[in-house]
Amino acid sequence: MAYNDERDDINSRGPGDDKLDELEAAYAADMNRKSVREEELQAARDYLGVILEEAEGKSIELEDKKQEANALAARLYRTENEIGELKAQSKRFNRQGKFLTFWMCFSLLELILIAGLVIALYLNINSGKNKQGDTTNVKNVGTSASSDPTPAPDAEEPLTARFSEELPNLIKYVSHESIAPFTVSTEKIDGLEYLVFSHDDIRVCYKNEYYLDEINFRKSVVIERGDSRFTFMRDYDLNADPVELCPILTNIGGVKYLTFVDYEGNIISGVPSGLRFISCSDFRMCECTDLKQKVLNLMTVEALQELSPIEGYPCVYSLTTSKAAYKYAISDNDNTEIQYNEFDIPEIASEFKLDVTDSGINWNTNVKLGNGLYLGALSGSLVIKNDTVLISGAKFGAYVPANQEDPALQGYIIPSERAFDSYLTVGGYNGERFYVAFNDKIDTCEYYWDNLDTSDPNNWIYYDADGNKASYRGIDVSKYQGAINWSKVAAQGVEFAIIRLGFRGMNEGTLELDEYFTRNMKGALDNGIKVGVYFFSQAVNEKEAIEEANYVINLIKDYKVEYPVIFDTERVTTYNARANGLGMEERTQLCKTFCDTVEAAGYKSMIYANTKYMLMGIDLTQLNDYDKWFAVYSSSITFPYDFEMLQYSESGSIDGISGKVDLNISFVDYSAQ
């Protein structure tokens, strides 16, 4: 209903005209006061506009306050709308002028209160302009320099907030072992709450509580030692597991560092986006933000124009390190996928692992083409020189099958479809490092190497679980030891000797007898030393392997041979011998043929090889039933597969032999069989 229509209705009533005049006068007075209040409201609005204009002109440090001012402005506009609603209500309820006056006064008081809050906010913004944060490096605690803004004693205490309200509860569940040697607590520093990791006199403090009006120094880490303090900025999440924030004490080159590792986003894996090392002695800090590039610089991977000879794998990629070069043959489909998807070449980040310990920092990663072609593994350590983080001891090894050096492959490697969980390291003939996967189809070694006494380099002894001697001392000899005084050898405690019977020529392939064979056999046996024999093979087919076995059997029939008759199969690295071109399958079959022939004649057979040939020259999965004579010249024996005799030195010294001699122990007493 229109206002004029309501007025006409009132004037037509008659008897209550005086009362109506009184109400009209009161209403007019209310409207006048309302007009005055609207002018005051407009003035407050204009003043608020000035404040907002100033707030918009401030730097990023005042951004939060500007948002609060905008929120108050919005509330002010809402109040104005409420007053407009009251005006409409006054038209409908003009008979109740006294009630309307009371309601408008109440709203006006609310408006004045809001305006007061705006003014207080403005004063608070101006008062916070002079607050400063400082990342002073090394300073004395208690001096005027400070890493965090601290209010003056007589100033109004600024408002603060916390990153985590649950921090005291979170640290209750942190085990000491997970952060050792540090302990963890929450403490007040300069009036603000920090997460504190302590060890001896070192304290690493993460700020949890901060002033609302500080922007640049909300997240800072303070390191304290005695009366010195060092502050640096670091992004961290105090609502996550506190263990992730605990620094690691690391000894690098004799210097103790506090180590901090940062990753991209929230995923604690891959190549760290940053590493900080802070010296515990003088707070000197060095950083590494390019670790991924440092690792990639260790090798060069590129596609080549040449074609590989391997059927189905025509495309070639090369990987070159400072030590060796490798060529990989891949299929057309894999090559198309790599080029189409533009994968990193090579890809190292997805499986990168960093191991930070109290004794140093090591890292390792798989090296891939695309998502599923594993080229090998790369590893190394980190060192610090002249405040620069460097990579040390980098090693790359190619994942290869056991038959990698078969002539048919011509040196090309077909990438593995998986990373090797466990592998054995073998050197290639051209300086390569090969990683050959552990094969669970081969019988494993059950010796407990802690029971091997290597204190005497010329006489290793193995003991059983009860401490009893469980090995037998031996040597192996050929014409290269010359004339041997076997009585002196026997007096040294040598229990058995493996004597070279002969060899097949590396060129023509003729069978040759070792010129000292007869003398050595007689000298050893006459002095109570048990004997076995070995033959250096250059057989290239099964017929020749049988010929070699029969040759040996015929020459030993007149001797008491209690130790094995041994097939010595090796690749000659110093000469292009006639058997060098054999593949793994061919050599394996020759081993079986020779040994089966010897066994049929009533002798114990055995196969001799070093680590490389045991892994890559013959297929041990087909030779579990044959004894092995394994050669490795190190007291650290990592070869996992079964063997019965160990050749542990090629430079032994035995009285009665001039010059050096090979030393052996047997874990089996063959004379008792």
Image: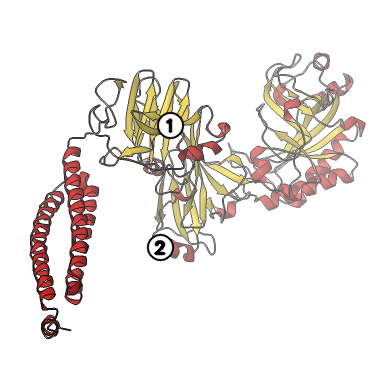
Mark 2 vs 1: CB contact within 8 A: no
Earlier along the polypeptide chain: callout 2 or callout 1?
A: 1
Relative horizontal placement of residue 295, taking residue 497 as reference (left or right): left
Residue 444, picture quadrant:
top right
Residue 557 in the image: x percent, y percent? Answer: 90, 36
Residue type, numbered disc 2: Asn
Residue at image mark 2: 341
Quadrant housing the C terminus: top right
Q: Say if residue 178 shows up in the picture.
A: yes
The answer to whether 253 is drawn above or below residue 20 in the figure is above
Instruction: Pick whichever, 449 or 313, lies toward us.
Output: 449
Which numbered disc covers residue 259? 1
Give the Cα distance between marks 2 and 1.
36 Å
Quadrant housing the N terminus: bottom left
Residue 463, picture quadrant:
top right
Q: Would you call the spot at circle 1 few (<14 residues within 10 Å), some (14-19), or many (20 or more)?
A: many
* Rendered residue at 43%/51% (across/down): 346
Identify the secondary structure beneath mark 2. Answer: helix
Residue 24 in the image: x percent, y percent? Answer: 10, 72
The answer to whether 33 is drawn above or below residue 198 in the figure is below
* Rendered residue at 29%/37% (across/down): 217
